[in-house]
Amino acid sequence: MSAVLTENTPPRAPQESPGLWTLAWRRLLQDRVGMVALAVVILFIAMMLASFTGLIARDWSKESGVSYANPAFLAGQENLEAKAVAAGGAVSKAAPVDLSDVDPLAPRYKEWEERAAKIAVTETKRAETLAFGGDKWGRDVLLKVIKGSEVSIFVGLVAAVLATIIGTFLGAMAGYWGGKTNDFLEWFYNIFTSIPYILLILAFAAVFKKGLDTIIVILALTGWTGIYRLVRAEYIKHSAREYVKAAQAIGASHMSRMFIHILPNASHVILVQLSQHVVSFIKAEVILSFLGLGVPVDMVSWGTMLAEAQNELVIGKWWQLFAAGASMALLVTAFSLLTDSLRDALDPKLK
Amino acid sequence: MTAYVVRRLWQMIPTLAGVILLIFFLFNWVGGDPAQVLAGKISNPEQIANIRKQLGVDEPYWYQLWVFVKQVFTFDFGRSWSTNEEVSRILLTRVGPTLTIMVPVLIIETTLAVTFAIMVAYVRGTLTDRMIMIVCTTAMSISFLVYIIVFQWLFGFILGWFPVQGWSESFWKNLSTYAPLPILLAVAVGLAPQLRLYRSFFLEEINQDYVRTARAKGLPEKKVMMKHVLRNALIPILTNIGIYLPSVFVGSFLLEVFFSIPGLGREIITAVNRSDFPVIKAVTVYLAMLTMIINLLVDVMYKFVDPRVSFK
Amino acid sequence: MKRLRLAVLALAACLAVAHPALAAEKKVIRMAFRTAETGFDPQKIFDRYSVGICENLFEPLLTYDYLARPVKLVPLVAEAVPQPEEGGTRYTFRIRPGILFADDPAFKGKKRELTAQDFAYSIRRFRDPKLASPYEWLFENKLVGLDELAVKAKKTGTLDMDTPIPGIEVRDRYTISFKLVEPDFNFAYSLAMPNVVPVAREVVEAYPDDTMGHPVGTGPFVLKEWVRRSKIVLERNPNHRGYELDTRYADPSDPWDKAAIEALRGKRLPVLDRVEIYPIEEEQPRYLAFLNREHDLIDETPFEFIEQILPNGKLAPALAKQGVHVFREEAPETTYDVFNTEDPVVGGYTAEKVALRRAMVLAHDRPQEVNIVRKGQGMPAETPVPPGIVGFDPAFHSPQQEYDPPRAKALLDMYGYVDKDGDGWRDLPDGKPFTITYKYNARTQEQRQIAELWSKSMAAIGIRVEAAAVQFADLLQDKRVGKFQMASSAWTADYPDAQNFLQLLYGPNTGQSNEARFKLPEYDKAYEKSQRFPDGAERSLLYREMNRLILAYAPWRLGVHRVFNHLQYPWVKAYKKHPILYTNFKYLDVDVAAQQAAQGASR
């Protein structure tokens, strides 16, 4: 069916390619929405890098506030959860049970007490309010969102790059070689697209150990199919073109024809696909986290924040849900608008 | 035509074989051991071995694979390991609720998306167009999980417009009472991407030479849109619906979990959590077949929509 | 037949719509379960939700009094609670004549009376290899002659259901006597478990493939409708004899008891006509469904929402205005984390090895577990034995598991767990660096937070704990075969005796329920000795000894006994939560007028 689709795409003259990128950039500069979107995306990536290098949000895991500390702009609101924590549970007043006759540690009880007495306890004062509120543990939601962007964007970017590499490579193979290679890869593609997406994700999740790398691998392994299809179509189209035949005539190898001559001409399709996949993978991470397949416990992502916050709206602690949901929406909106502008810039006929 | 269909059907066999191999490898070989879940709180290795024997998971892998293949051809996947319900019955009873949600979603979404898309394509490049696109982009950027949590709380509880959750035996009651909120949510999330996509289809057509010719002939713009553009854009739209159609049967597990809809999506999650292999196998195989058949139907339908397409 | 029944149902539904007055008289309760059920073959199930349904469909020989606390064993289909004979090795029951099974096509239109033979058959089913009962352990090494049958069954594939054995002696139509292999003073408890109940052999044989979907018992309700994992409907069993509430053991000063006695005075139980149960796994919809009055009661309210229900420990004004009642229950269950005592790093019995586990227990921030993760809805556990269980010792308290990081650090320093390579993390006494893996079930937020707490608390004293989320099936398997270092666990009482909890660390149970693979001769000796005594001072002393050994060797980090809040609207009458029995439908009443007025108003 993609053959039908490509039939309708306007033919692109190969001689356009040398100036394609400069022209596209010029067109992008004129697109105000695109530029704003680009600025937002750059801002987020800068934030992610700053957080990664430890410039900001380094002590995101520090419990600086009380449980569900109010946001600064809601300072006066009653915080029942924090009050309950402060009240604490009942402590048993029963006399301690003596273990000394059975305890293997009993011979050194005295030394133990002396050493323990020398170790100072530092009690930190917890703030009643935090800039944008606190989570269950009393961690600053704002810092969490920043730190969470690191994992979410990283997962989205790396998984998208990986999926793009897989999709491009296989698509190039199928489109360029055709014949048996094409048949085999089409078979492979059909298998992956015939299995419901959620089952595919769960199946891969069952196989791999849980961790950050796993999420990336799962997303990449289940997400390459769309890119494969489009790249394959591009390669089918281009490999028949004259410039490729010319390259062959001057003795360029298959590899060089595939990846040096054709690839740049298909790169605008790939680039748009890449950025679309970043968006969908950032969103998919939320679902994985909801299913408990997400990031490890000592890390934070927007997905784990949303999964954690799913019961917080009902009790009126909306800030974590809002902060994670809104930052994600902002980035994803900007990324999508940027993708649109990119596509328009690369393919002005669509305008 | 017949030859084409026969060949396409013939090609499904290797794909199905691949699906069987992949699912078998992922779940049977490397997935969790169902006997552990079924054995209860206190059990010894002997009892576990006994359960494994009854489930047939102690057989050599090639034999289990053979059993799987046999099941596919006899359409008999036996009974669920966790509830002992016949797998075919599970599928039959669960697909109804899923379709009760997803079919209206598909219809509403497509109608709205096509209508809006042709409207914004008509005013392409204007401020209205840009604004609508930005709003749409924002709407689709919010996580589905956030939508569900907020809407269920807001519309179900605070405003009380819909019940929070629930399902009944009566199709009409489901459609009138329980389904609207989940449908609304699914449309809210799904509309924007469709609209964006269809808009691009229309734009692509608008730039075609024949449209310019039609305009040059002096046909009014509205007529050009409705007659020429819509008709030709229908092909990619149909393709898109074809791609989308199999997921209609899977449904959205998030919706089903949060709104207590006894559908297939929820069943898949439970089955995976309980390593209920017969259910997983059956769902996968049936849905894979369904996907392939839908793809074939869509391709055949081109013939009728677009006589230029020939079957090779 | 099935189609006919459907048609009748449809007709009934139409009638109900046409005549609201007719529907109004029906007493119906709607509620949610937190997890989906699996089925209702009592000998084949183990999850508490399915067992909870079976409580209403079947009747064991004995049961627990509804109101008595601490729990009290009372006869149900037996005429009396038997006294142990022959030194605690024989128990004889006389079954009340005239008790009928619910009607089923398998009975071919005749009324079917319950007999002693049904018990003999049903108990043998536990050992049938074809059934692979998860409660097989209840009758392992228990009844004289049964183990031999089970050995034979392994070869033939099915258990011999007919040859009489001395362990299960059917003396006449209504008398059954059990002979035990060795003394067991808790045996009567196992005959009160809601899955040790009689099923009719004809029914089992009539539906060999789907016993899960064809429960036919003598209980007060029948399974009217079952959409698996989505809806369970119980209706009153017309064959049930009915009974009156036993008020002999009630506490007249307890408001719940008073209200129940008041509501049920002079009434034939069960009062309800219909109970509808919907499994809802997500917490927000389950909670909102109750607040929206779509459900009449909510058991085990998600504790995430607790401050909205009980702000400052008192019922919220909005709920109080509607007359909502809260039943607080200290559940007879214990959560804990298991150390694998065979692991080279966290295992072992030498002082050096014990010191590491003890330090980890001391450094684990349990106050945060209770107050933040569980929102205060849990009692810190002092011993494995929860409150409400015979053998629970409220005076048992030890600072050995109170959060105390300085003592933990001191202990680690003393035994050589110090940072030798300067990477900021402590190393083993021999200088090797180490990381401990904690396995937990990935699916729940609660488990994730407990894992997070481990990782955090241990980092604070310089020990690296890596939390590994694994699938439920894998977690169970890994724990059973000892393929873990540390893992999360929990245990809910099967019967109200400490033995049910203390067996979890009995050496010979390794590979079954002893996930810690803990083998301490002193402990095992005390355990074996305790089994030979009925409840009393001697046994309590032995239990105390075992609890002390658990603290000293720390094969577990004890978590909490969870506290549950059960909410009901005021039209639900006679509610009281039983610690062992999961449901109480047969005792509930409902004020239909109030129910309909309130639910009509909210819709």
Image (tube, grey):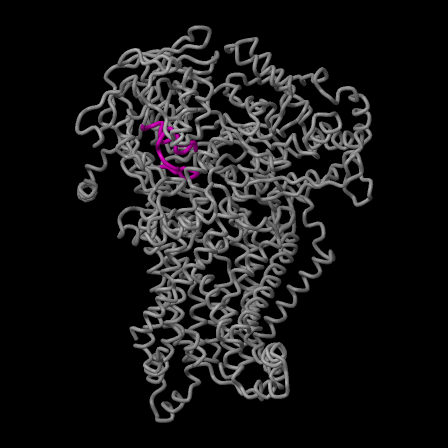
Residue C594: tell me if it is visible: no
Task: Look at 19% across and 37% down and name the residue there.
Answer: C22
Q: In this view, does C285 lie above or below B300?
A: above
Residue C519 occupies quadrant? top right
Figure label count:
0
Residue A71: tell me if it is visible: yes
* Residue placed furthest toward the front: C155
B212 to the left or right of C342: left
Question: Is residue C51 rendered magenta in the image?
Answer: yes
In percent of width and height, residue C11 lies at: 17, 43
Q: Which quarter shows the N terminus of chain C?
A: top left
C299 to the left or right of B228: right
In percent of width and height, residue C280 lies at: 41, 42
Q: Which of C454 and C578 is in front in this view?
A: C454
In percent of width and height, residue C197 lies at: 35, 23
Question: Is residue B245 rendered magenta in the image?
Answer: no
Residue C364 occupies quadrant? top right
B278 to the left or right of C481: left
Q: Is residue C197 above or below residue C79?
A: below
Q: Which of C391 and C123 is in front in this view?
A: C123
Task: Look at 60% across and 46% down and name the residue there.
Answer: A135
Q: Which of C413 and C42 is in front in this view?
A: C42
Q: In this view, does B121 lie above or below C245?
A: below
A49 to the left or right of C6: right
Q: Give the range drawn in magenta.
A: C31-57
Task: Look at 41% across and 31% down and name the residue there.
Answer: C132
In percent of width and height, residue C498 lies at: 53, 19
* Residue placed furthest toward the bottom: B217
Q: Is residue A342 above or below residue C506?
A: below
* Residue placed furthest toward the top: C86
